[in-house]
């Protein structure tokens, strides 16, 4: 495949919507509190599986100041979350922030054992 066709294929794949099962996971933002480490802040989250399959995912967060400047990013893995259940995690930011914007990143059903 020529370079031009590869570039088109990559652009096309990058514009596809996330898989349908990603919408089965719901993020619920929790409280923020100082970490044990000087200056770090923990953002607590919970993820509920509203689907019918056991799921694993990464939750990705951007930590922003009031003016929209990103001060840090982070992620938390969620593994083997059964249907109807909720998992709890926190993500640490290295600096103070005013708002966390989180989303489900990479996700998918867990293969049956």
Image (tube, rainbow, N blue to C red):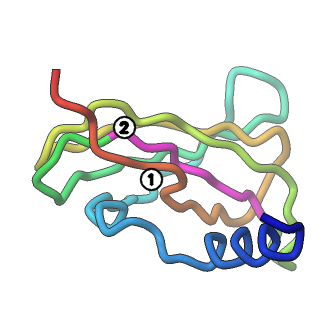
Label 1: few (<14), some or many (≥20) within 10 Å? Answer: some
- Residue 69 position, x and y percent, is 89, 70
**In the visual, does 18 lie left or right of 4?**
left
- Residue 83 position, x and y percent, is 13, 46
Which circle, 1 or 2, is nearer the viewer?
2
Asked if the residues shown at circle 1 and circle 2 are in contact, with their CB atoms under 8 angstroms apart, the answer is: yes
Give the residue pinned by disc 2. Answer: 88
Magenta extent? 56-64
> Which of the numbered marks, if any, corresponds to residue 30?
1
Residue at 65% across, 78% down = 12
SS assignment at label 2: strand
Q: Is residue 21 above or below residue 80?
A: below
Residue at 16% across, 47% down = 53
SS assignment at label 1: strand
- Residue 5 position, x and y percent, is 78, 74
Tell me if residue 102 is in the magenta stretch: no
Residue at 75% across, 42% down = 93
């Amino acid at each position: 495949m020529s370079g031009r066709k590869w570039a088109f294929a990559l652009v096309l794949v990058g514009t596809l919507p996330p898989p349908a099962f990603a919408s089965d996971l719901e993020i619920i933002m929790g409280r923020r509190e100082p970490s044990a480490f000087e200056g770090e802040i923990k953002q607590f989250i919970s993820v509920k599986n509203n689907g019918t399959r056991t799921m694993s995912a990464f939750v990705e967060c951007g930590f922003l100041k009031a003016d929209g400047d990103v001060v840090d990013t982070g992620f938390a893995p969620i593994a083997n979350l059964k249907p109807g259940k909720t998992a709890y995690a926190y993500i640490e930011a290295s600096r103070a922030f005013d708002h966390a914007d989180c989303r489900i990143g990479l996700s998918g059903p867990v293969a049956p054992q």
